[in-house]
Image (cartoon, rainbow, N blue to C red):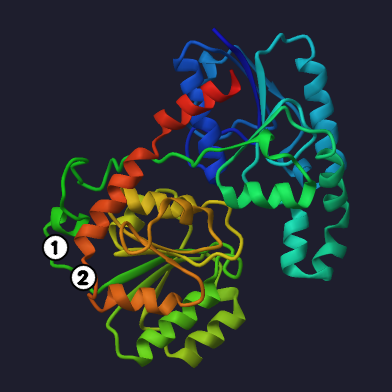
Amino acid sequence: MKKLAFVINVFREDYFRSGGEKLFYELVSRSIQDGCTVDLYCTTYPGKKTILKPKLNRIVLLGHPKDFKYPEKIENFYEKVKNYTRTGNYDCIISENISPPLDVGILQGHSLLHYRKKSGPLYGLIKHKHINAQKKWLKTPYRKIIVPSKTLKNELMENFNISDEKFTVMHPGVDKPCHSGLDPESHETPYQVRGDKPPIFTFGLSAPSFEKKGGYEFLKALKILKDKNYIFRAKIIYPKHKKNLKLQYLLNKYGLRDKIEFLPYQEDMQGFYNSISCVVMPSYLETFGLVALEGMINKIPAIVSRRCGASEIIKDGENGFIYDDNLYKKMAMLAGNKVDYDKISQNAYTTALKHNWENFYGNFITYIS
């Protein structure tokens, strides 16, 4: 069987802080189950759950998570990993995000050069060391590159002149809901399963980075719905909402305080999905957007911006909605009961079932062979 090395900043088995952490956990776990010999190189291994630890062939802890804020410290980390892996006789070394290339890269976030183009010259001045480091790293190509969407693939090809043949697109996987009370084969919505009367139509937004996640665009759409007398509510995951003075001003200006409930960080997102009718993803920079897929596996349709990689798995009006600059119109279709909600929800669920971790791992292990 294969001998694999995984290189990641922080490795967890639970309470994942990002879709990337979840993805690496699934690959490590399934590689071990598949009989592969797996070595792990990371800065830390936090969390209460450590089922995989005794099953790993080797764990090497290097540096500190905060080192990844500094290009020179990232280079030091990867130089140490190179020294450790040089005699490891690995079939494949898999690393995360844009970094000094080792072998196969799973790149999940936009490059800083892309952020500079979107954010302006001030961002470029602040991040110039990081931008120059990424340019330097990508001059030495990965053997293979895995990305979650064509959106990210096209960006990296354009900004770094990387050939198309280096890439493969693998949309991430998703878990079936475990605690919602849903029978995975059921055609009922979560509300029907719980036996509740259908609540006021509720839009959900996960926006820990409020502006980047399109929070202000979401507010404008909600204001239009309110002005047009639609009945709705909204839930927004945004722990720092009280400190955002611009947001507080707009809530008063738009008259939305009684329409929106702000939520703290959710360790378990299942309760959030159980309490909403639709996921909205108006992000300005989103290489995929796992929240959309997680909503879909809970039979909750998603409205996503065409900027988001998740739009690649959605057919507008069939299993969800895609918009360019008319977010409120898509939201009005749902809040105004102008579409067959149950049919779209079921189609969303059927689509999400195809994007599971078993299929993702199968595609991954075939690709790196």
Secondary structure of residue under mark 2: loop
Give the residue type at disc 2.
Answer: Pro
Location of residue 3 by image quarter:
top right
Question: CB atoms at circles 1 and 2 under 8 Å apart?
Answer: yes
**Image mark for residue 345:** none
> Residue 172: where, in percent of width, then height?
48, 41
Question: Residue at the location (55% across, 43% down)?
Answer: 148
Residue occupied by mark 2 = 199
> Residue 89: where, in percent of width, then height?
71, 8
- Left or right: residue 171 versus residue 276 is right
Give how far apart the Cα atoms at labels 1 and 2 are. 8 Å
Give the residue type at disc 1.
Answer: Asp
Nearest to the observer: residue 251 or residue 305: 305
Question: Residue at the location (64% across, 46% down)?
Answer: 153
> Residue 29: where, in percent of width, then height?
48, 23
Relative to 26, residue 312 above or below: below
Residue occupied by mark 1 = 196
Res 175 visible: no
Nearest to the observer: residue 330 or residue 42: 330
Res 170 visible: yes
- Left or right: residue 212 versus residue 348 is right
Label 1 neighbourhood size at 10 Å, few (<14), some (14-19), many (20+)?
few
Label 2 neighbourhood size at 10 Å, few (<14), some (14-19), many (20+)?
few
Location of residue 53 by image quarter:
top right
